[in-house]
Amino acid sequence: MSEIEIPKPDPAIMARRSEIVSGLAKLVPDECLISSERELVPYETDAFTAYRRVPLAVVLPRTTEETAAVMKFCADAGVPVVPRGAGTSLAGGAIPQEDAVVIGVTKMNRILDVDYKNRTARVQSGVTNLSISDNVGADGFFYAPDPSSQLACTIAGNIGMNSGGAHCLKYGVTTNNLLGVTVVLLDGSIVQIGGDHLDAPGYDFLGLFCGSEGQLGIVTEATVRILAKAEGARPVLFGFNNSEVAGACVADIIAAGIVPVAIEYMDKEAIHICEAFAKAGYPLDVEALLIVEVEGSDDEMDAMLSQIIEIAKKHDVATIRESQSAMEAAAIWKGRKSAFGATGRIADYICMDGTVPLSQLDYVLKKTYEIIDGYGLRVANVFHAGDGNMHPLILHNVNDPKESEKAQLAGDDILRLCVDVGGCLTGEHGVGIEKRDLMLHQFNETDLRQQMAVREVFDPDWILNPAKVFPLEVRETSSQSSQEAA
Amino acid sequence: MTIHKPASEEEAASLVADLAASGTSVRIKGGGTRSSIGRAIETGDVLSSEAVSGISLYEPGEMVISAKAGMPLADIEKALSDSAQMLTFEPMDHRALLGTEGEPTIGAVVAGNVSGPRRIFAGAARDSLIGVRFVNGKGEIVKNGGRVMKNVTGLDLVKLQAGAWGTLGFLTEVTFKLLPTPQESATLVFSGLDNEKGVQALCAAAGTPFEATGLAHLPALITGSDAQTVMRVEGFAEQVDYRLNQLSDALSEYGSPERLRGEDHKALWRNIRDATFIAEPRDRAVWRLSVRPTSAPNVVEVIKQAVDCRYFFDWCGGLIWISVPEDDDAGEETVRNAANAADGYATLVRGSEPLRRRVSVFEPEPAPLDRLSAGIKQGFDPKNVFNPGLMAAAE
């Protein structure tokens, strides 16, 4: 099987295991250090469960200062560090290696300050995404990025993966909603980047940290933008007899100058899976379904929806379901929101995350089915159509190694296709280990070396989350060439 | 002095490789309308993006445009307006403030992360910039990001290039996501509020769901009569009326606002965007402060006590434009201390060359960040070919 390589543990580090653990024990209280085999097992993987490695130890610091002490200790001892939020990464971004110390932020889970006048919230990085919106919701505000895992995932992880969600068509992703961070660098120094004002001075380190997948430092605090909630939100559901017109309809809505807050797409397989589970009343006789949501006052929404419905009619829409009440709106979303859970009920799946230009949506869907057919598998497509971020769920039986390998190969083929039509490997899940070895399909070595040169400013010895994002073979040639240059 | 005008990315790459090999540094130039921003530097040659021009991709149905870096901004805005779309961030035109001539280019907009009043609603240039191509200081062509708006594939060097003022590479192509141009647009004008009340009203407006896309306060010394607190709303026709009504109701404690539409409304926001209110007198230095909005009135109070200044507020109060006499340090210590006390920072946007030698144009960074910045520069441009010392003192 095309196994993803995780570096073998360094025997010299493994031999110092008890010394390292006792060193860590001097830095944090007992309840913050996990070192027994049994208790370490929950940290052996994240939501990319095909790969597992039990780490050497797990530290859950309570403060920025404790995090700094642990970082400095690990750096001085030459022990790899794998930062971890809630462990919901679908790309293996938080999967440890056996000779690594995991530093988890989950004990730093307080909302420190909410400033409604300036519309900011300062939080410790281990707070969950949803808890911010929950905290400010009663006052009419929310935190915009809304990844599907928002009940569990942490802001630290969101920053690491630059998380998006269903509503980023209007509100952007994490990088557009972050004003400042407190970061612990590898040498234990604590740095404040940005704050509660706009556009931090100097190079855009804030932007660089978003999506850096724990390779540059550990974020312990963040100041995020909170926004006033819209007066109302209302979805409309369209069923189409032909999956290709659904894509064209999306492009026409956008070209008409309407920016809905969300445009979600489901194909036939996804519709049937979700309907069987959620009983949302989805039409079962259509090939594709779009959920388009708009926001505003009742009149504003009426105006936008009638324009959107006109466009859908031009594309021979087969079913139109407008929501007249909050209950009907919830029913429309119910199926879509349960998509991953409902799919997990009938089969194991891997979830791809490529993004494609909207004009290529139909073509990529068609080719996706061909690829999946070629491997004799099934796929359910459910994704954010407004921004071209596709999530094909490739169904397989995880206990059948042959089928699992086919699923992985099919996934790789689909991601290469996304890149070939002008898109990218990952829209919001990150590269992690899952897509690491495909990076050379999207970038050439020069592109990657430039990124690695930036990475090495923060971590010259590749201690932080060392086997992620960059193909191992490029790293080897990179260190050779930099030695030659020196 | 030689002016290099490569006509393609490849030509630029081989040229930069030669420059690096011969130890020649260059000042990067787009349209030259912002060339007086930054620390005063001495370079041998000029590297112009003028000949690297044209739109490489425009897909209205995707709200995406890619343009070569030397493309005049005006040409891009014209092409977009034909499809009723626009850049999201309303880039400032620096010509009025800096007294420069020439045509602003899209590459320089990226290099300066140049935004305007809409920044508070739709983000800065860096927020809608989704892809770059550039030549690094070794003469290598590098791409990062792409043409899709959701992309977390590898480290985000796109953001690093935005606001790096050309110190990290010679940009050759930039890609933006776009927004539809609003059909209608109008302004609410509250009169006679002092700075404190004015910024309070702006913050209150920002906390409503009515999506103000511009929030500025112009004190009496700028308007020449009563202070004006101005709020821009946009959308389709009925929506604009609705939002104007709702905002007026929500802010009734601040008075009954007048409404501004048409050319007067457009001119107002152009003047706010371009800071023309403080362009005169010409011999004054101009600072730009970014602070938390509610702290802004006090920041100005503190500066006013020590320095003679003209000023106004954009970005809901969070952006303060101040002009001061160019004596001594042009108020640097006062201005920076006031901004820092509010956790913000200050940038000298206009100043004579001697002044730009005397004072820090950009906010000095704390030691760990300074070290990282130097490392980043080294990682992109090890031979210091591009704009050496423009942002920070060259080593």
Image (spheres, coloured by chain):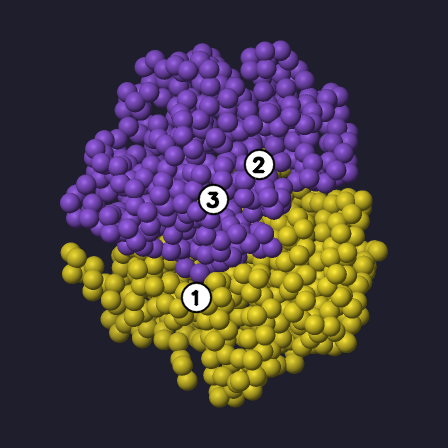
Chain colours: A yellow, B purple
Mark 1 — on which chain does it sit? A
Q: Which mark is residue A115?
A: none
Residue located at (38% from left, 34% from top): B31
Residue B230 position within the rendered picture, expressed as x and y whole percent measured from the top left: 64, 25
Looking at the rendered structure, whether the residues under marks 2 and 1 are on a common chain is answered as no
Residue A389 position within the rendered picture, expressed as x and y whole percent measured from the top left: 56, 62
In the structure shown, which secondary structural element does the residue marked by tag 2 occupy? loop
Q: Which mark is residue A432?
A: 1
Q: Is residue B212 visible?
A: yes
Residue located at (62% from left, 28% from top): B266
Residue placed most toward the observer, A71 or B342: B342
For the residues labelled 3 and 2, say whether their Cβ atoms are less than 8 Å apart: no
In the structure shown, which secondary structural element does the residue marked by tag 3 occupy? helix
In whole angstroms, how far apart are the C-alphas of marks 3 and 1?
25 Å
The residue that label 3 is drawn on is: B126
Tally of marks: 3
Whether residue A39 sits left or right of residue A75 in the image: it is right
The residue that label 2 is drawn on is: B118
In whole angstroms, how far apart are the C-alphas of marks 3 and 2?
13 Å
Which quadrant of the figure contains the N terminus of chain A? bottom left
In the rendered view, would you say B299 is above or below A181?
Answer: above
Q: In which quarter of the view is residue B351 placed?
A: top left
Whether residue B310 sits left or right of residue B198 in the image: it is left
Amino acid type of the residue tagged 1 in the rendering: Gly
Q: Is residue A189 visible?
A: no
Residue B241 position within the rendered picture, expressed as x and y whole percent measured from the top left: 76, 34
